[in-house]
Amino acid sequence: MSVAVRFAPSPTGLLHVGNVRLALVNWLFARKAGGNFLLRLDDTDEERSKPEYAEGIERDLTWLGLTWDRFARESDRYGRYDEVAAALKASGRLYPCYETPEELNLKRASLVSQGRPPIYDRAALRLTDADRARFESEGRTPHWRFKLEHTPVEWTDLVRGPVHFEGSALSDPVLIREDGRPLYTLTSVVDDADLTITHVIRGEDHVANTAVQIQIFEALANIEGGGAVPVFAHLPLLTDATGQGLSKRLGSLSVASLREEEGIEPMALASLLAKLGTSDAIEPRLTLDELVAEFDIAKVSRATPKFDPEELLRLNARILHLLPFERVAGELAALGLDEADAAFWEAVRPNLSRVAEARDWWAVTHAPVAPAADDPAFLAEAAALLPEEPWDLSTWGTWTGAVKAKTGRKGKDLFLPLRRALTGRDHGPELKNLLPLIGRTRAQKRLAGETA
Ligand code: GLU
C-alpha cells in the first residue's frame, strides 16, 4: 500500500512553529516515500473553530510550499461519524453514561485523594434499563464512552520504539458528547481508516490517545472489515531555550508573525524545523527538495528540541546571503523596490538578516544621502580622480588605486572617509558593488559634502 500521511490541525488558532514542524515532517515523509499528504481540518469543535483560522492554515502551508494532495474537513463528515457510532453502539462497544461533569469531578477527586489513578469506574455499565429510563425522564441525555478491552496495547513507534500500555490503566474515552456531537478521539480514527492513512506522525502529547485509538481502529475493523492500524510516530514537542513549552508564546511564534513581522523566509523556517531535534546539522537549504533528500524519520531524536528565535534569524540571514534575485524579486517589489535588480540584490544581500532591510540600502544607492564628509581636502582629491562612466565592478578598485597613488593613503585612512562620504555610514556592503549603483553624479556630489 502506498504511503499516506495527514496533517490534522484544529482551526481554533494560528499555526505556530510547533504545529507547522509536524506539518513539515509529515510532508517530507510523504514526499520521500513518493506518498500522499492529506490536509485535514479537525473542525468538529464548532464553538472554537473559525473560518479565518482555516484560511490562515492554508496560507501558512502554501507559503512554506507544503502542498497537499488531498483535503478533508471533519465537519463535512458528520453523517459518516453517526454511522460508525451507531455500529459501535450496536456491537456494545459504545455505552451511554449519565454522569454530570460535577459528578465526574467528584469521582476523580475522590480517587486522587486515595492515591489512585483517576480512571472512570464504569458505573454506567452497571445501570439497568430502569435506571436509564429514570435518568432520561429527568431530562438527562447520555454521553457515550468507548469500552476499552482490558488487554495490553502495544506498538512500535518510529520515534519512541516499542510502547506498551495496559488497557486497564486507561479511562474509557468519551466519543460522543451529550449533544450527540462526535469527539476528536473517534473522528480522527474514522478519517484515518476511511482515507487509508498508513502513518500517523504527531506530537508526543498524543501518545495516550494512540493507545485508545488503536483499540478503536481494531473495533472498527472488526465491525466493518479491512483497515490496518497505521504505523505511529510521536515526536517530542518543541520547547523554548529554557526548556519551557511554547504555549505561552504562541502569538509571537505563529507562522503568520514570523512571516509578516519578523521577515522570516519560508526556507529559513523549513531548514530549521526539518532538522531541529534530529541527528543532522542545521544548515541553510534553498529548496524543499534538498530537505526531502536528507529526510529520514530515523534521525528524529527522543530528546526535547529547543526552538530559539535567534537561531532562526541567523539562519534567515544565511539563506538571504545565498538566495538568487529571482527568489526575492516579489518580496522586494512588495517593499516598493520594484526597480531593484540583480546587481542591487547581490550588492546588499551579504548585509541583510531580513529582506526588508534592503530598503535601507536602496535609500543609500537611490535616494539622497547626507554624507559624513569630514575630510574635505582628501575627498576633493578623490572626487577629481573619479573615472568616467560606464562603471562596473572594477571601477572601485581602479579609482581607489589612483587615490592611493595620489594621496599616499592606505587601509582605513583611505577607505573609511570614502565610505562615510558615499554612504553616510561607517559600515555596509562592499563599495565595489555599491559604487556603480550610486553612480558618478551622486558620488561626486556626496564627495563634495552635498546631500545627493
Ligand atoms: N487535531 C488534532 C490536534 O491538532 C490532531 C492530532 C492528530 O494528529 O491526530 O492535536
Image (cartoon, rainbow, N blue to C red):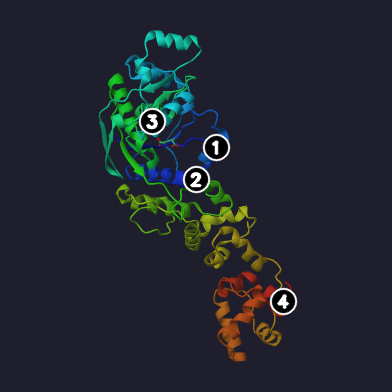
Estimate the spatial distance between the alpha carbons at disc 4 and disc 2, rounded to whole Å. 55 Å
Task: Decide: is 378 above or below 124.
Answer: below
Q: CA distance from mark 4 to mark 1?
A: 53 Å
Q: Which mark is residue 247?
A: 2
Of the two numbered discs 4 and 2 on the same chain, state the one appearing first in sequence: 2
Label 1, on which residue? Answer: 53
The reply to whether callout 4 and callout 3 are in contact (CB within 8 Å) is no
Question: Callout 3, which amino acid?
Answer: Leu
- Mark 1 or 2, which is nearer the eye? 2
Displayed quadrant of residue 426: bottom right
Residue 445's label in the rendered image is 4
At label 2, the amino acid type is Ser
For marks 4 and 3, give the CA distance. Answer: 84 Å
For the N terminus, the quadrant is top left
Q: Residue at x 34, y 56 (%)?
A: 280
Q: Does residue 424 appear anywhere in the picture? A: yes
Q: Which residue is mark 3?
A: 111
| Within-10-Å neighbours for mark 2: few <14, some 14–19, many 20+ | few
Q: Locate residue 103, reporting x and y percent.
A: 46, 23
The mark closer to the camera, 4 or 2, is 2
Task: Residue 117 in the image: state x and y as whole percent.
Answer: 35, 33
Q: CA distance from mark 1 to mark 2?
A: 17 Å
Mark 3, secondary structure of its residue? helix
Residue type of the residue flagged with mark 1: Tyr
Which mark lies nearer to you, 4 or 3?
3
